[in-house]
Image (spheres, rainbow, N blue to C red):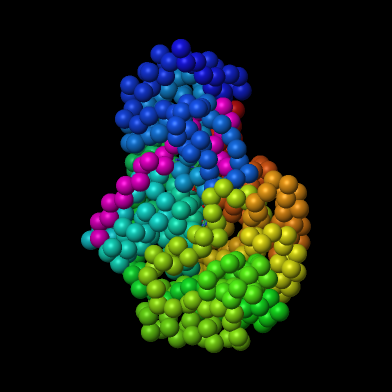
């Protein structure tokens, strides 16, 4: 007879036999995967190859009722759970050793109501799932830059992408969540129906329950936009980055430029002889009317002598896929990040200095602009806060072999330490790595932290939902 050991909230091992597991499967349309079963290893594997953890059981849910059954089963027995959305969290929060994983990644339905300009997406969707279906109507939700990232982790932590300068955090553009809370109830959470919980869900991560669906506001975008990537030799980094600073400060929110310094990837649009050599690149996306957008991107395209340039009229969906190949599943990743008020004097010099010290051909330092609509709302509008942020930098280490861990992690930490002097003091909860704990979580939420603790204490006093950047309830 099958018997498994599952970790409890108290840190003990609970033995569960087949008859007990049958109680759960009888209440599910989806299936349970135990170690050794076909599909178990695929389901436990996430984007960051540094994370290699083995849940005791994986529940592959295919509807809200499955999730309710799992939460009830776990709560009654005091079992630790973790929740997997798109599996793209750098800290590997989707998977915990010995826990019961609630795997949402089969729940990928999207329903678009073009008249009301709303999309309802199931919680296991990737960004690409939502973009594909909304773009059929020339509409888009405010999502991030890499299409296989999960919508739910991204939205619960705030979320930003090419539309953020126009419309704010992803979470500012959520109408409602469908959520299963620790008491086992299925709730619709919106400003009208549960304002406190709605406030917390918009930034507070997976602390308050399992989200089964999200309703997003949609905007007119594309399908054709002006966008793409353009790169120059690193020798010209200072001039290019100065231009990037000016463009950012002076362009309307429709125009977004992300800067990166990194060794050139073997991309077909870059000459072979430059592959592996340091370049400075801009990822440009202009969602304004095409004629105006064209003028703005032409100013960038004619700057200096680019090594390669694929900034052109393109489908918004293709823009949203542009960076995917740089972020394959299974590589080793380590990030350090910080919010910035903007590009202050001295920052760009450090950006280049640390770019020159990159130790892996896959690593990069990136600057993402955020200023614009974020600051139209007050800091306390929702848990994510950080509304005075102008930019975020991410030191993104990416390499292949475990023996290179030490050198790559040391590079990222050093670059972050040195660039941190420009920080607003805040940091993005969704970019915190596995070792970043309570002090960094407090940095991420600033003065919104105390209200998050209140909501957590009310809504999940036993801290059932703790496989996240955890807000610990008051005892
Ligand atoms: C390559 C890459 C690109 C990225 N680009 C961006 C970007 O452009 N903009 C941006 O804002 N962020 C970006 N991020 C960060 C991203 O927002 C976070 O990593 C986020 O946590 C990913 O969500 P996920 O569902 O894929 O992750 P997972 O690892 O599956 O989950 C992350 C956290 O969310 C919780 N969670 C997931 N699903 C649920 C659910 N249904 N209910 C409750 N809790 C849940 C998990 O428990 C976990 O704590 C990027 C990350 C990567 C790796």
Q: Main secondary structure of the magenta part?
A: loop
Nearer to us in this view, 291 or 72:
291
Q: Tell me if residue 310 can be seen.
A: yes
Residue 99 within the magenta-colored segment of the rendering? yes
Image: magenta residue range: 91-114
Q: Is residue 383 above or below residue 31?
A: below
Which residue appears at 52% of the width and 60% of the height?
A: 325
Residue 326 horizontal side relative to residue 238, left or right: left
Which residue appears at 37% of the width and 59% of the height?
A: 131
When asked about the image quadrant of residue 449, the answer is top right
Q: Is residue 59 above or below residue 339?
A: above
Nearer to us in this view, 271 or 94:
271
Which residue appears at 49% of the width and 85% of the height?
A: 298
Which residue appears at 23% of the width and 61% of the height?
A: 115
Percent coordinates x, y for residue 213 in the rendering: 36, 44
Q: Residue furthest front?
A: 272
Residue 448 horizontal side relative to residue 397, left or right: left
Q: Is residue 241 above or below residue 173?
A: below
When asked about the image quadrant of residue 118, the answer is bottom left
**Labels in figure, total:** 0
Nearer to us in this view, 225 or 272:
272
Percent coordinates x, y for residue 452 in the rendering: 54, 42
Percent coordinates x, y for residue 287 in the rendering: 41, 73
Percent coordinates x, y for residue 33 in the rendering: 44, 29
Residue 137 horizontal side relative to residue 102, left or right: left
Residue 160 within the magenta-colored segment of the rendering? no
When asked about the image quadrant of residue 250, the answer is bottom right
Q: Quadrant of the C terminus?
A: top right
């Amino acid at each position: 007879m099958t018997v498994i050991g599952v970790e409890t909230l108290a840190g003990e091992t609970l033995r569960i036999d087949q008859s007990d597991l049958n109680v759960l499967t009888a209440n599910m349309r989806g299936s349970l995967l135990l170690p050794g079963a076909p599909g178990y290893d695929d389901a436990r594997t996430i984007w960051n190859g540094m994370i290699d953890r083995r849940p005791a059981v994986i529940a592959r849910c295919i509807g809200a009722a499955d999730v309710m059954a799992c939460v009830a089963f776990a709560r009654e027995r005091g079992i630790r759970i973790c929740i997997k959305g798109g599996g793209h969290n750098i800290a590997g929060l989707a998977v915990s050793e010995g826990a019961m994983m609630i795997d949402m990644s089969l729940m990928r339905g999207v329903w678009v109501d073009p008249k009301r300009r709303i999309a309802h997406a199931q919680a296991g969707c990737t960004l690409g799932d939502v973009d594909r279906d909304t773009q059929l109507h020339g509409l888009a939700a405010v999502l991030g830059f890499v299409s296989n990232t999960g919508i739910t982790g991204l939205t619960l932590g705030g979320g930003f992408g090419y539309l953020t300068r126009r419309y704010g955090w992803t979470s500012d553009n959520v109408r409602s969540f469908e959520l299963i809370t620790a008491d086992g109830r299925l709730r619709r959470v919106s400003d009208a129906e549960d304002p406190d919980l709605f406030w917390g869900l918009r930034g507070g991560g997976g602390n308050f329950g399992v989200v089964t669906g999200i309703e997003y506001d949609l905007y007119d975008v594309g399908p054709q936009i002006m966008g793409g990537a353009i790169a120059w030799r690193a020798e010209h980094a200072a001039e290019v980055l100065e231009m990037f600073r000016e463009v950012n400060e002076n362009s309307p929110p429709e125009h977004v430029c992300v800067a990166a310094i990194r060794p050139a990837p073997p991309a077909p649009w870059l000459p072979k002889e430059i592959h592996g050599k340091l370049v400075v690149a801009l990822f440009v996306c202009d969602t304004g009317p095409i004629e105006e957008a064209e003028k703005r991107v032409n100013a960038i395209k004619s700057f200096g002598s680019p090594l390669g340039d694929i900034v052109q009229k393109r489908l918004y969906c293709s823009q949203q896929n542009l960076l995917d190949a740089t972020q394959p599943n299974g590589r080793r990743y380590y990030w350090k990040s910080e919010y910035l008020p903007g590009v202050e004097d001295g920052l760009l010099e450090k950006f280049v200095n640390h770019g020159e010290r990159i130790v892996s051909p896959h690593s990069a330092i990136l600057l993402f602009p955020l200023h614009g609509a974020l600051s139209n709302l007050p800091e306390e509008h929702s848990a994510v806060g950080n509304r005075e942020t102008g930019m975020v930098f991410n030191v993104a280490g990416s390499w292949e072999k475990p023996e290179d861990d030490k050198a790559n992690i040391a590079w990222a930490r050093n670059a972050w330490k040195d660039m941190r002097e420009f920080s607003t003091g805040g940091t993005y909860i969704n970019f915190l790595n596995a070792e970043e704990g309570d002090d960094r979580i407090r940095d991420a939420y600033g003065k919104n932290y105390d209200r998050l603790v209140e909501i957590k204490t009310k809504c999940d006093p036993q801290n059932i939902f703790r496989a996240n950047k955890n807000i610990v309830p008051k005892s």
